[in-house]
Amino acid sequence: MGHDMKRPTSHRLDRFARKRLSSISSIPNNKNVSTSQAAELLQTTVSFLYLGRNCQPPFGPPYHRLSQRHGYYVVGEIKQWLAERDERFSTRGKSK
């Protein structure tokens, strides 16, 4: 069930994306983590991830739903999302 929230163009996480990415670089890309573990890796809240995956269109790292109440995140996809957020933050305001 989606919320009527617009997809944000930027996140508070953007300015810290590179630091977060660096701090989780040693975790294997194929490791699956719960929402609370993903929130810990991103140093954000479970609520942020919950809202992100339930908005239309979704925002945040990709979430893999196993059932109505259960799912997981993949560390490699979290890293990729952080790299994309860092790229957007780094190029924001620069002329192309």
Image: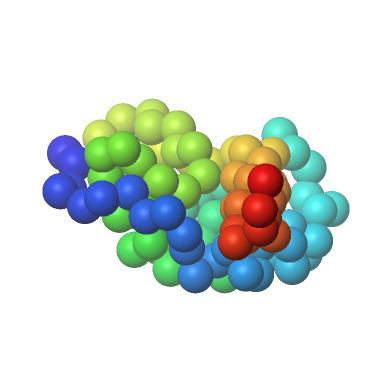
Tell me if residue 71 comes above or below residue 79 in the rendering.
Answer: above
Along the horizontal axis of the image, is 12 left or right of 1?
right
Q: Total label count? A: 0
Where in the figure is residue 95, as x and y percent of width and height?
A: 66, 53
Residue at 21%, 52% in the rendered image: 5
Could you say which quadrant of the image residue 21 lies in? bottom right
Residue at 65%, 69% in the rendered image: 16
Residue at 31%, 38% in the rendered image: 57
Tell me if residue 48 comes above or below residue 73 in the rendering.
Answer: below
Along the horizontal axis of the image, is 89 left or right of 71?
right
Where in the figure is residue 8, as x and y percent of width and height?
A: 37, 55
Towards the viewer: 20 or 70? 20
The reply to whether residue 31 is in sight is: no
Where in the figure is residue 28, as x and y percent of width and height?
A: 78, 42
Towards the viewer: 38 or 93? 93
Towards the viewer: 89 or 20? 89
